[in-house]
Image (cartoon, rainbow, N blue to C red):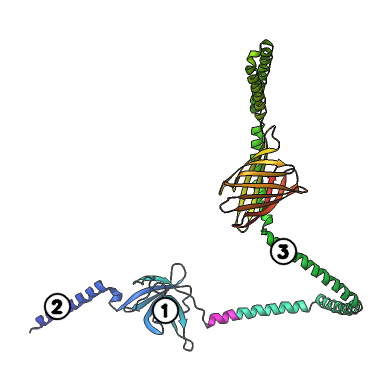
Amino acid sequence: MSRLSEAKVGAIVISALVVLVLLSYFFLGPVRARGVWPLEIIFEDARGLIGGEPVRMAGVQIGVVEEVSLSANGKASVRVLIKDHVHLYENYVFTVSSGALVPERFVDVQSVSPVEAAKELTPGAVVEGLERPGIPEIMNAAHSMMTRLEQTAASVHSVVSNPAVEKSVEQLEISTREAAKMIKNLESLVAEARPHLAETARHIAVAGEETQKAASYLSARIRQSSAPDEIEAAAVAAKEAAENARETATSMKALLSDQTWQDDFRTSLANFREISENLREASEDVKEGTPKIKSIIERADSLMTDASQWSDRLKPPEVETGFDFLNSSRADRSFTDARFDLSFAGRKKSFLRLGVADIGELNQVNFQAGRRLGNNNLRYGLVRSKIGAGADLSLGQGGRLSLDFFDPNRLRADFTMEYPLGGEDGWGLIFGMRDAFGEDWGFVGGRLGE
């Protein structure tokens, strides 16, 4: 083979190698061609880390530091090359560590579990590294702490060596000795008065026993009455609802005292009276004229009597309003009741009670006819939407006990005690039991009524 042919063959081989290298560089890249992939780690301080130092994970070298440079924001940028078969994730921890005995630096990678939710790092990724203090940093911190301790000790020494402080200490010693003398005198005084103190202690013990008995008795009474402990909370709730109750009572009173309505009644009464007079005059005329129309006279008299009765019945009734605001700890809620007692002219001993119990929740109807017997009342009709009867009994000094029995199928009962608190608003304290023989809900609250 001639030299020209050999040269051609050599040129072809060299060209093929160059093309192969270029293809490897193009398809695999400059890093993958070497079997590693790049990763950039940002540290606050590289601590003297230089290129060529190892990257380790669990004590095994998985890469090498390629370059350490300063980033645009003034931090250390460490570029490392990781072996292809090593997979790192974004939740891994990257630190700069040093050997305990051998003075070497390396990048330490710590795996964090679990890694299912973390993304795998790709070539060229940028992660943040953490700072781990080394022995120099610990020594610097210890030196700073010792310096501050020395300054503190010097300050304490300057304070203690102050003449004013020494004088204060001397005065404290004198005061201590005087206090010791006073304690001795007090001990002797106590020894002399010990018999009197023993007698006084005995009296105090007896008084304590009596107080304990009284407290036990009151506690038992409170438990028997099923009264809740939240009396103050119930009073506050009653005051909050008082304004609405007062507005309702005022509106009803205004309705009954409306001038137009009263004028209409007065006009109707005047018409009835005029009819009565005319009928009376007609009756007298007929009596004087002939006895044949006696029946007409009797009818006229009856008509006159009925007209007089109707005139009395058309008078507006007197209305007494009342509102009860109750709180039951056992039921864990509050109740609001409203009642209106209507008294008609000519029937002072009878009254009609209208009302609603448990407003806003059960809205139970009260519709009862009542009879006054002195200071006591008897009632019958609908009690909380059930057939029943009740009584209001006077207890003296303004106290009153109300008993209501209703619902014959289950025989339920309500017991309410009322004690007036005085004042212009007509407030009273009420307590008792609702749904006796059933739920037995003890309650306490306030009553607002005229």
Q: Residue at x 63, y 17 (%)?
A: 296
Magenta residue check for 138 = yes
Q: Residue at x 23, y 75 (%)?
A: 24
Give the magenta-colored segment's residue range.
135-142
Q: Secondary structure at mark 2?
A: helix
For label 3, the residue is 219
Q: Nearer the viewer, residue 280 or 6?
A: 280
Q: Secondary structure at mark 1?
A: strand
Q: Badge 3, how many Cα within 10 Å: few under 14, some, many 20+?
A: few
In the drawing, does residue 131 fall left or right of residue 206?
left
Viewer-nearest of labels 3 and 2? 3
Label 2 amino acid? Ile
Quadrant in which the N terminus is drawn: bottom left
Residue 244 visible here: no
Viewer-nearest of labels 1 and 3? 3
In the drawing, does residue 74 fall left or right of residue 178?
left
Label 3 amino acid? Ser
Q: Nearer the viewer, residue 269 or 419?
A: 269
For label 2, the residue is 12
Q: Position of residue 33 (x, y in %)?
A: 27, 77
Quarter of the figure with residue 232: bottom right
Q: Secondary structure at mark 3?
A: helix
For label 1, the residue is 109
